[in-house]
Image: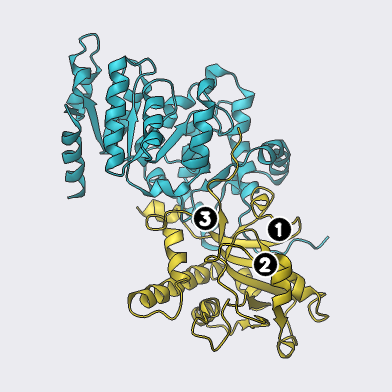
Amino acid sequence: MENVDFIDAVSPFRELAAYEALWDKKDTTVKKISDLFSQYFYESNADNYKKIFTIFKNNDFNFSSLVDEKVIGCYKEKLKPFIFKYNFNISMFFEPEFPCALLDSFLPIYLLYYMGNFALLNKKAISVVGTRMPTEEGVRRTEKLVRKLCEDEYVIVSGLARGIDTAAHKTAIATNGSTIAVIGTPINKCYPPENTKLQQEIAKEHLLISQVPFLKYESQDFRKNRFFFPERNKIMSSISEATIIVEAGETSGSLIQARDALKKGKKVFILNSCFENKAITWPERLNNLGAIRVREYEEIKQELNKNNG
Amino acid sequence: MDNIQRAKEIKFQSIDELTRKRHRYLVDGDICYHWRTYISKGDFKVYDTNNVIENFKKELPAQGAPLHYKNKAIKQLAKEFFEIISKNEQRIEYIKNSTFIPIPPSAKKGEKKYDDRLLRLLYTVSDLLKLPLDIREVISNRVSVPPSHKSEKRLSQDDLLSNYMINEDLCNKLHKRIIIFDDVITAGSHYKAMQKTLLQHPNFSSKKIIGFFIARAVNPNYNTTL
């Protein structure tokens, strides 16, 4: 049947199927997937580069360049229930709208699933993160801080977890600010379940993003899936100008984000109250790595303005 | 930054099973391509694609800065289109064997608001390729209509259909492929009305009619049930 008019264009569904197929191999991690694609763009070894250069000259390199046609067809079938049920979009590395910050990273991200207003990624954004079990004071500090950031037109980035994250998103929404939630589950799932409504509201009026593939997530249990949570913190640090930790325990995912942000040369702010808590040692350690101890919003603002000056 | 430039490359995307349902007039079998993604009601000051397209659509008559931005947008988008096409021989062949028909401007020729931005873009691509592309204004509006991105109520399929007319003089010696060209595809109503109008004409009935767009529009407030 001659119904395909051939120009070698990218078919997003085909690319999504190829991407999910690559993920679906045994022991795949965010790092392995990232490295797999990075070798095509980063001159890590000369031989590979030569090979790739020939691909590049006349044709496009895409996810589907790495997957067998039969396999792609099979994964399209597997994905159909998802694409009919959920109104998500994808953005791929080559697109003009895909954030450069995600490619210019130690762990480049090549595909994002999203719902909502993708333009929010082009605005100045700050991550506000912290513990899932905050004190009342911690929640109050988050609210105050987010209100001030929104007044200064920063988009509030957080991870939709319990505690500080939830307070950050909710305050941004209540203040008529904008917020981006980067989640550690596929775009159709919500964790914790009590945040389902909040996630839906963010998906509709703000921006919800995820890097987590549907099929891989379905096929493995929570012990493996929980590794997606710290990975999403790295996306958050990439898309934010700075990261603020309001309150955090010794094993909080926000510490991963803080270290990642510092490694990327971005600013990290730690609220003074964290230093006063003698039960934890991370504030001093991060402080030694370059994180900035702050007492009030004005100090954060001054530091941020230095960035732009 | 080199690596990023290698990764970032403007490419044609097809509107397929994943994206077609967002353009409610499109049906299975409609072949449409685009290279950017426009956000309906998006904040265009910070979002490059909306910014370029708003400039591209700047209302005429424009003078000074507005006209400057419009011309710049036409040039930039033509260059992008050219870069995609000139990537390989097959694409150039494909374009050579196609007849381009732009969606008619909302204001008619001779009126102050007449805006031939789509034609200008295509002729710029033709210049860049150093190839005489087959570009024809086969369809025009009987009466001027308000620009659809500015009007509150979108015209219905029937309104569009009854307002389109074919210029008989331009319907001969067509290529086997007809490319309907527009800046942004939203619901797809203009594209479908153009396709229907053309297919009613005997010279077009055996042709393959496809759509090229600068961008497809996504609505950020789309129903997002989990």
- C-beta proximity under 8 Å, tags 1 and 2: yes
Compared across the picture, whether A177 is left or right of B98 comes to left
Give the letter of the cyan chain. Answer: A
Element at label 2? helix
- Displayed quadrant of residue A86: top right
Q: Label 3: which residue?
A: B40
Element at label 3? loop
Disc 2 is attached to a residue of which chain?
B
Q: Residue furthest bottom?
A: B169
Task: In the rendered view, tell whether residue A1 sits above or below residue A132.
Answer: below
Disc 3 is attached to a residue of which chain?
B
- C-beta proximity under 8 Å, tags 3 and 1: no
Task: Give the amino acid type for the residue marked by disc 1 in the picture.
Answer: Leu
Q: Earlier in the sequence, mark 1 or mark 2?
A: 1
Residue A82 locus on image (x, y percent):
67, 36
Give the letter of the yellow chain. Answer: B
Element at label 1? loop
- Displayed quadrant of residue B161: bottom right
Residue A112 in view (yes/no): no
Q: Disc number at residue A169?
A: none
Crowding at dot 3, Cα within 10 Å, few <14 / some 14-19 / many 20+, comes out as some
Task: Give the amino acid type for the residue marked by disc 3 in the picture.
Answer: Ser
Question: Which of A136 and A103 lies nearest the eye of the viewer?
Answer: A136
Compared across the picture, whether A34 is left or right of B179 comes to left
As measured in the structure, the alpha-carbon distance from the residue carrying label 3 to the one carrying label 2 is: 18 Å
